[in-house]
Image (spheres, rainbow, N blue to C red):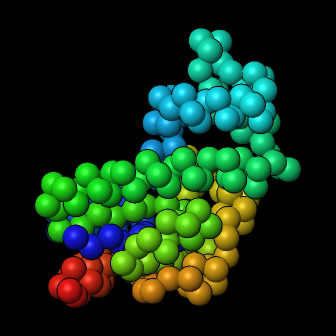
Amino acid sequence: MKVIGITGPTGAGKTTALQVLRTFGAEIIDADAVYHDLLEGSSELRGALLDRFGDSILGPKGGIDRKKLSQAVYPDRLEELNALTHPIIVREVWARVEEARRAGLPAAAIDAIALMECGLGEKCDAVVAVVAPLELRIRRIMARDGIDEDYARRRALAQQSERFFRERADYVLENGESDTPETFAERARALFARLLEEV
């Protein structure tokens, strides 16, 4: 089974690339969704967060409130949060990879914007960065999330640069101004077919 890491900045087209991988029978593992599952269900993560950030991060029903956690973390304590959460997330993501392997699937794709920073990238057989020009990504984020340009720009600029992703990936999928979702999907399909054929 091939383990393929998919990373890149928001608005670049990772979702389209992942939909293509799904057509090859790949298990898609979304690291953000894993994190949200763990926030709700992991007593280990809950205990670690409460020890570090205090009970001001709890919601009215006693669970971790993501908005309150975010307020406790930004802008100065993000590294602290990542150091605490990444090992737990990596362990759970890899448990799901192993489930896919036992199920006999041809591939597992790990969707993670912080794929390299958290250490998952080095566990993958291949890392694919999906990139697109900044202004195009900003327009896509605005349309996708229904937000104004200023907020979309701040979100885009808060992430790692395109160069960061290019330098750390084994393969780069470009999603340019002249691309349609169909042309980009075809380019992704060609790359993934090649990767999955490699023994």
Query: Quarter of the image holding residue 178?
Result: bottom left
The x and y percentages for residue 145 are 53, 48
Q: Is residue 116 visible?
A: yes
Please tell me whether residue 139 is drawn above or below residue 75 in the rendered image: below
Residue 129 is left or right of residue 135, and the answer is: left
* Camera-nearest residue between 140 and 82: 82
In the shown orientation, is residue 48 left or right of residue 132?
right
Does residue 163 lie above or below 39 as drawn?
below
Q: Position of residue 157 (x, y in %)?
A: 72, 66
> Residue 130 location in percent, x, y?
46, 75
Residue drawn 19% across the image and 56% down it: 102
Q: Residue at x 51, y 32 (%)?
A: 42
Residue lying at the far right of the rendered structure: 76
Determine the residue positioned at 17% across, 68% down: 106
The residue lying at 49 percent from left, 74 percent from top is 122
Q: Quadrant of the N terminus?
A: bottom left
